[in-house]
Image (cartoon, rainbow, N blue to C red):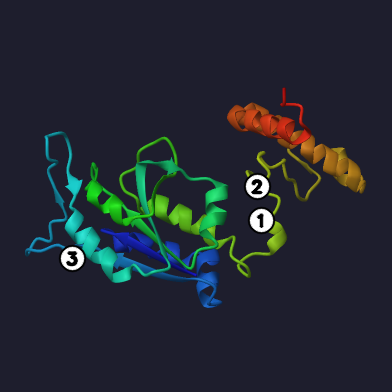
Amino acid sequence: MKITFLTMCPQDYDSFLKTPVIRRAAEKGICSFEVKDIRPYAGGSFRHIDDSPYGGGAGMIMRAGPLLDALAEVQQADSHTVVLAPAGCLYTQKKAREYAEKDHLILIAGHYEGIDARVYEKADELVSVGDYIVTGGELPSMLIADSVVRLLDGVLRKASTDDESFENGLLEYPQYTKPQEVHGMKVPDVLLSGNHGAIEAWRKEQSLRLTEKNRPDLYEKYLTAQKNLTGDGQE
């Protein structure tokens, strides 16, 4: 797999590419990374890649020309191009697994008030990492890349990605390690029992409780899905 970042801040990726999981994927040849600076594609001595919006409004807009020229150099027939934008669909674990099946993922990091919408016509989709605004798309693009790379075969032990939050529609159950007691707080007895059936039942119950408390939206979706599977939701 190959992941390409289109950005006006290529230096932001220096530390990210040295993080253990990302570096391991690159060293093993599982995934390669390309950081493409879009500034050289802007004409003029000042390399302006932004301008005021047509129709008026606050802020500046990233110009389409430099972005499209940079994109044309990296985009191939097998590329899947994603623009990071608040107007995009919400990024999920399911989407991460879809991206992990791609041969080439291009992530376009926006800035300023937004990107000239003509860039969207050359992209496969717009994606948002949440209902909030950040300064630029660099951090969201790294977030997506990390979530994808860890799913690639050979990067992590497969079992470590099979039973995580969101994989089964629920949040993950609480985890504990040694020692058995810290500051008066003990590990639940069931986890020390050696009874794997009881442990599995406890973990399922805890996942349900955590999801209901912290993500009621996911909890309702899970209940609806379960009803549909059993036929209880049918009239």
> Nearer the N terminus, badge 1 or badge 2?
1
Q: Quadrant of the C terminus?
A: top right
Q: Nearer the viewer, residue 55 or 86?
A: 55
Crowd band around label 2 with a 10 angstrom C-alpha radius: few (<14), some (14–19), many (20+): some
Residue 167's disc is: 2
Tag 1 and tag 2, C-beta contact below 8 Å = yes
- Where is residue 156 shown, x and y percent of the image? 64, 64
Dot 1 falls on a residue whose secondary structure is helix
Dot 2 falls on a residue whose secondary structure is loop
Q: CA distance from mark 3 to mark 2?
A: 40 Å
The residue located at (73%, 30%) in the rendering is 227
Tag in front: 1 or 2? 2
The residue located at (17%, 43%) in the rendering is 60
Give, as a three-letter code, the residue at label 3. Answer: Tyr
**Which residue is at the far front?**
235
Tag 1 and tag 3, C-beta contact below 8 Å = no
- Where is residue 128 shown, x and y percent of the image? 41, 43
Can residue 61 be seen here? The reply is yes
The residue located at (53%, 58%) in the rendering is 148
Can residue 185 be seen here? The reply is no
Residue wearing tag 3: 41
> Nearer the N terminus, badge 3 or badge 2?
3
Residue 161's disc is: 1
- Where is residue 138 shown, x and y percent of the image? 36, 54
- Where is residue 23 shown, x and y percent of the image? 50, 70
Q: Quadrant of residue 188?
A: top right
Crowd band around label 3 with a 10 angstrom C-alpha radius: few (<14), some (14–19), many (20+): some
Q: Nearer the viewer, residue 44 or 103?
A: 103
